[in-house]
Amino acid sequence: MRALTYTDYGDPSVLRVTEQPEPHAGPGQVRIAVRAAAVNPIDWKIRRGLFDETSPLAFPAIPGTDAAGVVDEVGSGVAGVSVGDEVFGSGQSASAQYAVLDHYTVKPAELTWEQASGLPVTSETAMRALRLLGVTTGQTLLIEGAAGGVGSAAAQFAVANGITVIGTASDRNQDYLRSLGVLPTTYGAGLRERVAQLAPQGVDAVFDTAGSGSLPELIEIAGDPGRVVSIADFSAPQHGARVTSAMSDEPAYDALPQAADLAREGRFTVAIDSEYPLDAGAKAHERSEGGHVRGKIVLTV
């Protein structure tokens, strides 16, 4: 099969499309013929070797965890999904013609292949953070970096549950946040005052997806570091706040079918920042590393 691969850690130039052996579904897994695969920040961080001490790779490596496609092989113990079904989910080595998924659900017709491929990591991360924050109906949540993949997923889950959401984003993304039911504001100096105007009663929790150095101010806005969770600022514990990852906290893979159900109801969508063919995988990774992405970067297969 054709796959995006690299044989050593490095910048996007190490990526090449090569022929690789096809993977096969094991117990509880499904294999899909990939139609689209998302590029997430974790993909280029792994490719650059940022986790080589704790999780060294076996080369050649195929990046990517998220994909959408048609099931063509079902492992033992799989229920509710059959060969020929359209699904999306997460696994390993997704940037290829075929990928094996560990966590998956049926793709809603309301989402394109590209949109569906962008759901797994963002929706799981968003749901995990919301649970750690414990925000409930009637409360107010501030999301730093609400226009990105995880931020917009968290915003939509929260709005669907009757939570008021204030989200920071650049000027060009303000209308996008409004379309999600979010009260938008810009990031940067003076955020506390701007949030106070939007929520005079204060906010109940803060979710930092940006890691832009604003954590001290976010804690001030929350009034308690225990009410702040970050996925991007690893200094958070030094301030009494919390960093969450799928390795440190209970994963929320049930977010996948929840997102799919909301999409069927017209209450969940995925913005696509850019699309690239598999052969242009290096350009997709370069785009992801550049930051300031609205929505998802996707490889089409």
Image (cartoon, grey):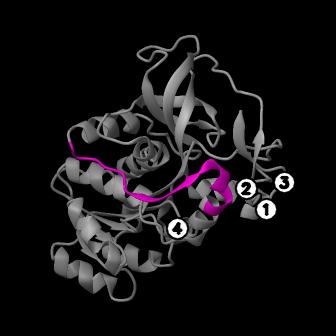
Q: Residue 236's mark?
A: 4
Query: Image height check: is 264 above or below 300?
Result: above
Query: Image height check: is 216 above or below 124?
Result: below
Q: Earlier in the sequence, mark 2 or mark 3?
A: 3
Q: Earlier in the sequence, mark 4 or mark 2?
A: 2
Tell me which segment is drawn in magenta. Answer: 266-283
Q: Quadrant of the C terminus?
A: top right
Q: Earlier in the sequence, mark 2 or mark 1?
A: 1
User: Farthest bottom residue?
Assistant: 189
What secondary structure is found at the residue carrying circle 1? loop
Can residue 135 be spotted in the picture? no
Which residue has dot 1 on it? 10
Amino acid tagged 1? Gly
Which residue has dot 3 on it? 8
Q: Nearer the viewer, mark 4 or mark 2?
A: 2
Amino acid tagged 3? Asp
Q: Who's the residue at 42% across and 29% down the image?
A: 105
Does the segment drawn in magenta span residue 275?
Answer: yes
Estimate the spatial distance between the alpha carbons at disc 4 and disc 1, rounded to whole Å: 28 Å
Estimate the spatial distance between the alpha carbons at disc 2 and disc 1, rounded to whole Å: 6 Å
Q: Residue 166's mark?
A: none
Mark 2 in CB contact with mark 1 (< 8 angstroms): yes
Q: Who's the residue at 64% across and 56% down the image?
A: 280
Q: Nearer the viewer, mark 4 or mark 1?
A: 1
